[in-house]
Image (cartoon, coloured by chain):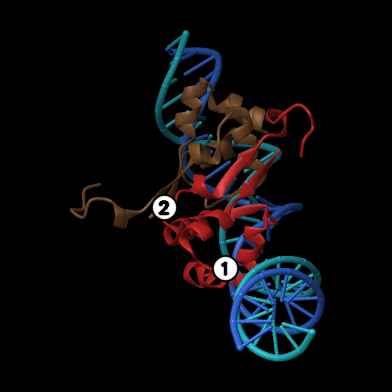
Chain colours: A red, B brown, C blue, D cyan
Amino acid sequence: MEILVNLDVMMAKRKISAGELAERVGITPANLSILKNNKAKAIRFSTLMALCRELRCQPGDLLEFVDDQQEGSDGRT
Amino acid sequence: MEILVNLDVMMAKRKISAGELAERVGITPANLSILKNNKAKAIRFSTLMALCRELRCQPGDLLEFVDDQQEGSDGRT
DNA sequence: AAATATTTATTGTTTTTCGATAAATTTTAG
DNA sequence: CTAAAATTTATCGAAAAACAATAAATATTT
């Protein structure tokens, strides 16, 4: 059970690089990387807001709740 | 421009009270209230996860990005 | 009105972001 | 393949904020 940050999907859709997005959002590339690779344990709304603004999307496009109990009961992945 | 926490909508949909949800999620009613009334400035994924689990919903059901520039240009609301 | 539930406020602790920076790794070009 | 560029990982410290605990105020319900 976890929250996934699907930044890469929206970045691909908007054809924007990590470096460019970091600059536009106003955080360091290093911190954006942490967010993008699911290493973050929380997020400030100010950051989420800037990401949504620059990617022209909704929080739901970036955050996904994955419930293990809800997947297939055959243990795949 | 802001991030809205639409907890009340899902709570109504699931017919669950604030006290009950707080207990199931594992935070104090006081802290849930802060979240529910848009007083929070960030959220831990562990909390968002527990909310999604108990409300059987996705982050996108609870978080909304409102862009002022995107609304009507006549200053309504 | 009384009981219950929710909100607001305060204090202290702990967690985590985030900047800054550097090093390691990966990806992209030539 | 090699070199450059981009990205990721890792530290460190500082600032921000969650969260618990608690109490008081407010609102809701019965």
Q: Position of residue B20 (x, y in %)?
A: 60, 24
Residue at (45, 59) in percent of width and height: A55
Residue B28 visible at all: no
Q: Are marks 1 and 2 on the same chain?
A: no
Q: Position of residue B61 (x, y in %)?
A: 49, 36
Mark 1 or 2, closer to the camera: 1
State left or right for residue A20 relative to residue A71. Answer: left
Q: Nearer the viewer, residue C18 or A62?
A: A62
Tag 2's secondary structure? strand
Q: Is residue D27 above or below residue A33?
A: above
State left or right for residue A43 relative to residue A49. Answer: right
Q: Is residue A59 above or below residue A14?
A: above
- How many neighbours does mark 2 have within 10 angstroms: few (below 14), some (14-19), or many (20 or more)? some
State left or right for residue A17 relative to residue A36. Answer: left
Q: Position of residue B18 (x, y in %)?
A: 54, 28
Query: Please, what is the three-letter code of the amino acid marked with disc 2?
Result: Glu
Is disc 1 in contact with disc 2, using a CB cutoff of under 8 Å?
Answer: no
Query: Please, what is the three-letter code of the amino acid marked with disc 1?
Result: Ala
Disc number for residue A18? 1
Answer with the quarter of the image where residue B57 lies: top right
Residue pointed to by mark 2? B2
Marked residue chain, label 2: B
Q: Nearer the viewer, residue B5 or A58?
A: A58
Residue at (59, 51) in percent of width and height: A6
Answer with the quarter of the image where residue A19 lies: bottom right
